[in-house]
Structure formats: C-alpha cells, structure tokens
Image: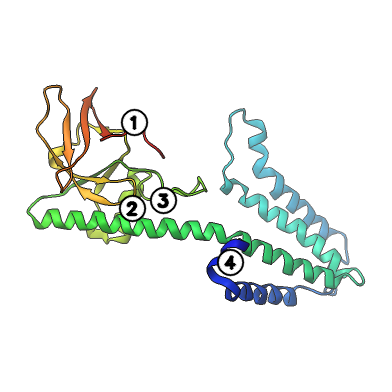
C-alpha cells in the first residue's frame, strides 16, 4: 500500500488519507455518553452478540472434514469482531485519560486499512480495464461479422486464460474465466443487443460437439489479450481442423474427441495456464 501511494499517487493520496483519519478520530467518542452501560445488561448483550457473530459463521468449517473457507465467509465474523472492538473503545473512552488513546487508535486503524486496500483496488482496476478491452474487441468482431451477412448466435473464444494480465492475487479473474462471465460482460458493457451465447475455451479445453464451428463466430485471444477472428480450414485426414488468423498464420487446431471438440494452441504444450 505504501509503495503504491508513494509511486502512483504521491503526497496527494497520503494527504487525503490523513484528513480522513483525522476526521474519524475527531468524531470518535472522547467520553462515555451519559446513561450508557449504567446497567450490566447492555454491554453483556453486545459482548454475547459479538461473540456469536464472530464464532457462529465459522463453526461449520470446524465440523466439516473437507470444507473450504472463502474470504466472503468471514464477513459476518468481522461484524462480531467490530462489536467486540466497540466494547474496548467504549472502555477506553470512559477511562480517565484514555480518550486521546481511543481517538489515536481510530486514526491509526483507519490509515492502516486504507493503505492496505490500495493493492486490492489496483487489481480491480486492472481487471476492469482489461475486461473492457476484451469486451470491446469481441463486440467489434460480432458487429463486423453481422455487417458482412453472418448471423452470430454464439461466440467461441479460444485460448483463454483466467486472468489478463497475470495478477498476484488468485481471487481476481477476468471475464474470460467462464462462459457465463463473458456472456454477462457482453450484455452489461456492450449493450443488451450484444448479449450472445458464449463459450470460453483454454488451450487443451473443449466445447460440445453440438456447437458447430462453421455456424459459430470463432475468435482467438493471444497471450497478451489481443483478439482476432479465426477461419477454419478443411479437415485433415485425421479429422484435425486448422484455425488461421486474419494474417493467414496458424492459431491452433480443433479435434473431435468423444463428442467434444478440443482446442490446441499452435506451438503450445500442456493444458494451458489459468
């Protein structure tokens, strides 16, 4: 976070963080409001609610032998943790001489969270920008094909990766990660008239035989994310169909295997990268 703030936004962003943190510290309670916790019941309820929200959402993962915990599963627990921290803040604000420490804690915590979120926001920005480029290129290819008299009912995007560019955070994915993400991105970013059935196929992947290559718009996306329309050549004796780009260069091949059409990138080995 510090590196991004210093190299990309400089003092302006840091100054904005400082102003926001100072504002939060100013609005933090400097003393316990009259009547709060005069009886035992309110703080006990907050303590019990905080513990319940903190522990209960995570309980199934302690019982399941093969459970997977995603970041979103922690959201209810964070609310419980916030309630417990609120109790601590109330205690600090009520203690003599500790109200300044309570305000300082709010300011420091806000600054840490703001700086820590910069890398996440940067990754979201990179993914969004690349998705916009991919959708724009696919939409342009569809319009160009339809202007030439073709009826495009399905788009098949070959040689896809899960993320462009490759990011350090594995939980960020581009619209090329799955069929439904590309379909949704086309409708959302290129307009409802551009909504099309879509299939994304990585190197070594396959799509159903029911999707005829000759009746679908075949597009190829290279390792940099550039998209080109592909043409299919006549099948070879072994049934392999070569795909060429607009420059006549071989992009990859299609091979019918057990009711599926498998794609292979020209010159690539293995099953491709996510």
Q: Give the CA separation, mark 4 to mark 3.
A: 21 Å
Residue under the image location 21 percent in, 32 percent down? 254
Give x and y (percent) for residue 178: 36, 43
Q: In this image, 3 relative to 53: left or right?
A: left
Q: Looking at the image, is 185 positioned above or below residue 25?
A: above
Q: Nearer the viewer, residue 63 or 158?
A: 158
Q: Give the CA separation, mark 1 to mark 2.
A: 30 Å
Q: Give the CA separation, mark 4 to mark 2.
A: 33 Å
Q: Nearer the viewer, residue 40 or 14?
A: 14
Q: Label 4 belongs to which residue?
A: 5
Q: Label 1 belongs to which residue?
A: 269
Question: Quarter of the image holding residue 37?
Answer: bottom right
Residue 184 disc label: 2
Task: Give SS at disc 1.
Answer: loop
Q: Looking at the image, is 106 positioned above or below residue 140?
A: below
* CB under 8 Å between discs 4 and 2: no
Give x and y (percent) for residue 94: 87, 69
Task: Give SS at disc 3.
Answer: loop
Q: Badge 2, how many Cα within 10 Å: few under 14, some, many 20+?
A: some
Q: Looking at the image, is 84 positioned above or below residue 70?
A: below
* CB under 8 Å between discs 1 and 2: no
Q: Badge 3, how many Cα within 10 Å: few under 14, some, many 20+?
A: some
**Identity of the residue furthest to the left in this view:** 149
Q: Which circle's residue, 4 or 2, is located before the other in the chain? A: 4
Q: How many marks?
A: 4
Q: Label 3 belongs to which residue?
A: 165
Question: Quarter of the image holding residue 90?
Answer: bottom right
Q: Give the CA separation, mark 3 to mark 1.
A: 20 Å
* CB under 8 Å between discs 3 and 1: no
């Amino acid at each position: 976070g510090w590196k991004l703030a210093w190299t990309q936004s400089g003092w302006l962003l840091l100054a904005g963080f400082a102003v926001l943190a100072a504002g939060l510290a100013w609005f933090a309670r400097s003393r316990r409001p009259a009547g709060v916790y005069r009886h035992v019941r309110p703080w006990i309820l907050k303590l019990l609610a905080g513990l319940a929200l903190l522990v209960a959402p995570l309980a199934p993962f302690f019982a399941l032998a093969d459970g997977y915990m995603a970041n979103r599963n922690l959201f209810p627990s964070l609310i419980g943790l916030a309630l417990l921290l609120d109790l601590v803040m109330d205690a600090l604000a009520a203690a003599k001489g500790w109200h300044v420490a309570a305000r300082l804690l709010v300011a420091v915590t806000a600054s840490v969270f703001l700086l820590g979120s910069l890398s996440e926001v940067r990754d979201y920005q990179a993914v969004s920008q690349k998705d916009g480029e991919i959708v724009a290129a696919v939409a342009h290819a569809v319009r160009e094909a339809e202007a030439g008299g073709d009826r495009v009912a399905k788009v098949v995007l070959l040689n896809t990766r899960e993320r462009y560019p490759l990011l350090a955070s594995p939980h960020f994915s581009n619209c090329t990660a799955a069929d439904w993400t590309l379909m949704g991105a086309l409708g959302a970013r290129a307009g409802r008239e551009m909504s099309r059935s879509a299939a994304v196929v990585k190197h070594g992947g396959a799509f159903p035989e029911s999707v005829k290559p000759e009746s679908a718009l075949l597009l190829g996306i290279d390792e940099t994310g550039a998209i080109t329309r592909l043409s299919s050549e006549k099948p070879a004796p072994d049934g392999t169909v070569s795909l060429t780009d607009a420059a006549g260069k071989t992009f990859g091949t299609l091979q019918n295997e057990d009711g599926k059409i498998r794609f292979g990138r020209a010159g690539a080995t293995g099953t491709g990268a996510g």
